[in-house]
Amino acid sequence: MGKLFIFTGSGISVDSGIPTYRTKDSLWDQYDVEKICTYSTWEDNMQEVYNFYNKRRAELFAVEKGERQ
């Protein structure tokens, strides 16, 4: 049996209404990546990190339910 590999990037989510990380008006335009995505700053900004990822989960859930596009 053959194997299937799919290569993709963050832009695949754009059509579903999920913001990308690096384009104009992206997530990193709204948030400081150094305050969200490093372990050392996670310890200092735990609530901000949780809020960021909870927002991502809510966006994905909305897409799964068909509420966003």
Image: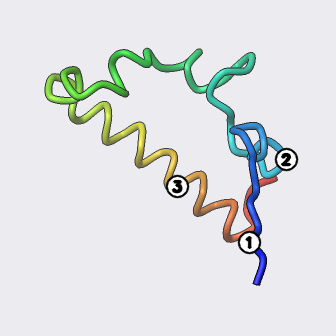
Front residue of this view, candidates 60 and 41 = 41
Residue at image location 59% in from the left, 15% down from the top: 29
| Front in this rendered view, residue 50 or 39 | 39
In the picture shown, does residue 2 fall above or below 4?
below
Name the side, left or right, on which 55 lies relative to 6: left
Between residue 62 and residue 3, name the one nearer to us: 3
Task: Give the residue type that dot 3 points to.
Answer: Ala
Mark 2: secondary structure: helix
Where's residue 60, x and y in %? 60, 57
Question: Residue flagged by tag 2: what amino acid is it?
Answer: Asp
Q: Quadrant of residue 20?
A: top right
User: Residues under labels 3 and 1: Cα distance?
Assistant: 33 Å
Which residue is denoted by mark 3 in the rendering?
58
Q: Residue at x 22, y 25 (%)?
A: 45
In the rendered view, would you say 56 is above or below 61?
above
User: Tag 3's secondary structure?
Assistant: helix
In the image, residue 42 sits, relative to residue 32, either above or below, namely: below
The N terminus sits in image quarter: bottom right
Residue 10 located left or right of residue 55: right
* Residue at x-position 41% and y-position 49%: 54
Q: Which residue is mark 1?
A: 3
Sequence-wise, the earlier of marks 2 and 3 is: 2
The crowding category of the residue bearing disc 2, from other C-alpha atoms within 10 Å (few below 14, some 14 to 19, many at least 20), is: few
Q: Quadrant of residue 33?
A: top left
Which residue, as the protein is rendered here, is positioned at the far bottom? 1
Q: Secondary structure at mark 1?
A: loop
- Judge from the rendering whether residue 6 lies leftward or rightward of residue 44; answer left or right: right
Closer to the chain start, of discs 3 and 1, is: 1
Mark 2 and mark 3: span between their CA atoms? 17 Å
Q: How many marks?
A: 3
Which labelled disc corresponds to residue 15? Answer: 2
Q: CA distance from mark 2 to mark 1?
A: 27 Å
